[in-house]
């Protein structure tokens, strides 16, 4: 039995950066899907804001193009949805037009107001100051911040202080869309809704954990942002640490926002430092060279950067790949490595968490039965969300007792016959409901930067360049060595490799 989807009251959602890539490709489609499902009532106002001089109709046309066929599948609903959408040209850095904008928002004093900052972070402060100045933080108002929140602890603190001077912490929703993914939610359900796993969820029974977020794409049009960030800031400091926390946290007393976030924070505080002394042993960073992904020849990182830029560069120290071995210094996880790896232009697009259990202590089987493999719980976030539990069974039929390692496989789309919803669908409605459980609290962001900062500093101090790897591979060979030194291998999700 499943609980029905809960609708919300009509609300106002202002998307600053409403013409940008994220708004058009992710946020508006997410809203449309929720509308189709009846969760967003008529009377809701979705207001796109950017500098471009567009009227409502021009904006609607722009987003229709971005909705990639969703409109064509459901034209009647789409027409109705577009009635909720309007546009206001505003410059976050100029006062012109803000008076009228304030009047527009003031027309619905009872609506929950969500101000979604889908712009570059250097505009967050200007936007929030103006929202404060024009008296828009009234009633039930919330602000949503996209990543990245700063590029180090000091800049994150500046943003949080400035936004915090207008919106208090309970109104501030720092989005990490990985936390809205079905599989991550399922990690909570699996761990805390089944009696099966929790007794095994510790150093006594778990050998190691792997978290991989691999992309086949390069930096594309986001080169100038990416070259200033790199894989550690773009992926590890936020998404991957959040996933690690969800795997490693103690059972919270409830799913109340602070109960969950308090437990995640304890994990972040327990991460053992990686710094000048041990970064060379515990981390590997790489940068892609020309190669091929998905059957297509692709340029190397520097050439890709130079493609769209007037200022050509010859060299960059930015890592497009990172692998590292993290450890959590507490009783539950002492001695259990958490291997993290992420990169662009890798062999496959896959995001997954692998929990590898310890082998059985003694084999009763004859060697001819084949090797005994570890049980692995694989939680796949993309491309096809689902859970696999790798078990050892007997190969069916006569012919002697032969062991096979096979997965109990639950692809969510197949199992439930539903199209996977995007993480943003859940998260935007959580903001409207005022539920911050799946959003990062300020102290989590700070703790994550406190751990990531010394890694970045160690790389800089070393003076070494990222190791080259060919596009379309699994990164530098040192990443394989990082895990193989410990007698383990990166997960390859097929039967032969798990035998
Ligand atoms: P983008 O495509 O560059 O869009 C930026 C938006 O901001 C545009 O609508 C732009 O429109 C508007 N803008 C720029 N200057 C402005 C100003 N002074 N006043 C008002 N509006 C202004 O960026 P994006 O890719 O959508 O990313 C938005 C945010 O989400 C960034 O923080 C990014 O790091 C984060 N993010 C993006 C993705 C993604 O997949 N794209 C994923 C995760 C996080 P005008 O130029 O017309 O003003």
Image (cartoon, grey):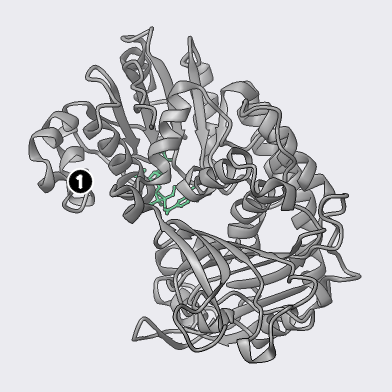
When asked about the image quadrant of residue 392, the answer is: bottom right
Q: Nearer the viewer, residue 226 or 29?
A: 29
Residue 389 drawn at (x, y percent): 55, 62
Residue drawn at (41%, 16%) of the image: 112
Residue drawn at (57%, 22%) of the image: 171
When asked about the image quadrant of residue 283, the answer is: bottom right
Residue 286 drawn at (x, y percent): 63, 79
Residue drawn at (50%, 23%) of the image: 142
Relative vertical location of residue 126 with respect to residue 68 in this rendering, above or below: above
When asked about the image quadrant of residue 3, the answer is: top left
Task: Label 1: state its secondary structure.
Answer: helix
Residue 155 drawn at (x, y percent): 69, 45
Residue 167 can be seen in this image: no
10 Å neighbourhood of mark 1: few (<14), some, or many (≥20)? some
The residue furthest bottom is: 368
The residue singled out by tag 1 in the image is 62
Count the numbered circles shown: 1
């Amino acid at each position: 039995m499943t609980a029905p989807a809960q609708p919300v009251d009509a609300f106002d959602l202002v998307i600053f950066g409403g013409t940008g890539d994220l708004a058009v490709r992710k946020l508006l489609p997410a809203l449309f899907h929720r509308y189709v499902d009846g969760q967003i009532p008529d009377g809701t106002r979705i207001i796109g804001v950017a500098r471009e001089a567009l009227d409502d109709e021009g904006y609607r046309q722009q987003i229709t193009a971005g909705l990639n066929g969703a409109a064509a599948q459901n034209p009647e609903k789409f027409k109705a949805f577009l009635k909720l959408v309007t546009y206001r040209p505003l410059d976050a850095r100029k006062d012109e037009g803000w008076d009228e904008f304030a009047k527009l928002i003031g027309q619905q004093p009872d609506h929950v107001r969500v101000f979604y900052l889908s712009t570059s972070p250097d505009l967050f402060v200007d936007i929030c100051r103006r929202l404060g100045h024009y008296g828009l933080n009234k009633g039930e108002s919330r602000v949503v911040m996209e990543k990245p929140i700063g590029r180090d602890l000091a800049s994150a603190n500046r943003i949080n202080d400035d936004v915090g001077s207008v919106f208090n912490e309970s109104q501030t929703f720092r989005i990490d869309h990985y936390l809205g993914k079905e599989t991550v939610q399922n990690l909570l359900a699996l761990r805390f809704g089944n009696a099966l796993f929790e007794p095994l969820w510790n150093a006594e029974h778990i050998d190691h954990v792997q978290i991989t977020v691999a992309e086949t794409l390069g930096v594309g049009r986001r080169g100038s942002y990416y070259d200033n960030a790199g894989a550690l800031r773009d992926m590890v400091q936020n998404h991957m640490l959040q996933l690690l926390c969800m795997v490693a946290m103690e059972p919270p007393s409830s799913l109340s926002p602070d109960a969950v976030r308090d437990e995640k924070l304890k994990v972040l505080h327990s991460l053992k430092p990686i710094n000048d002394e041990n970064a060379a042993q515990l981390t590997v960073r790489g940068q892609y060279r020309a190669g091929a992904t998905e059957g297509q020849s692709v340029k190397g990182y520097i050439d890709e950067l130079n493609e769209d830029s007037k200022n050509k560069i010859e060299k960059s120290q930015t890592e497009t790949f990172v692998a590292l071995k993290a450890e959590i210094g507490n009783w539950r996880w002492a001695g259990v490595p958490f291997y993290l790896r992420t990169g662009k232009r890798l062999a496959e697009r896959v995001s997954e968490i692998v929990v590898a259990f310890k082998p059985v202590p003694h084999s009763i089987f004859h060697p001819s039965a084949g090797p005994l493999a570890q049980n692995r719980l694989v939680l796949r976030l993309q491309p096809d969300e689902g859970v696999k539990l790798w078990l050892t069974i007997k190969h069916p039929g006569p012919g002697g007792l032969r062991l096979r390692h096979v997965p109990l496989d639950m692809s969510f789309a197949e199992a439930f016959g539903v199209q996977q919803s995007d993480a943003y669908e859940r998260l935007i409605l959580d903001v409207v409901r005022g539920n911050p459980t799946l959003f990062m609290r300020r102290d989590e962001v700070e703790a994550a930067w406190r751990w990531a900062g010394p890694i970045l500093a160690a790389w800089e101090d070393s003076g070494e360049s990222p190791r080259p790897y060919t596009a379309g591979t699994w990164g530098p060979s040192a990443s394989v060595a990082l895990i193989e030194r410990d007698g383990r291998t990166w997960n390859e999700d097929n039967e032969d490799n798990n035998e």
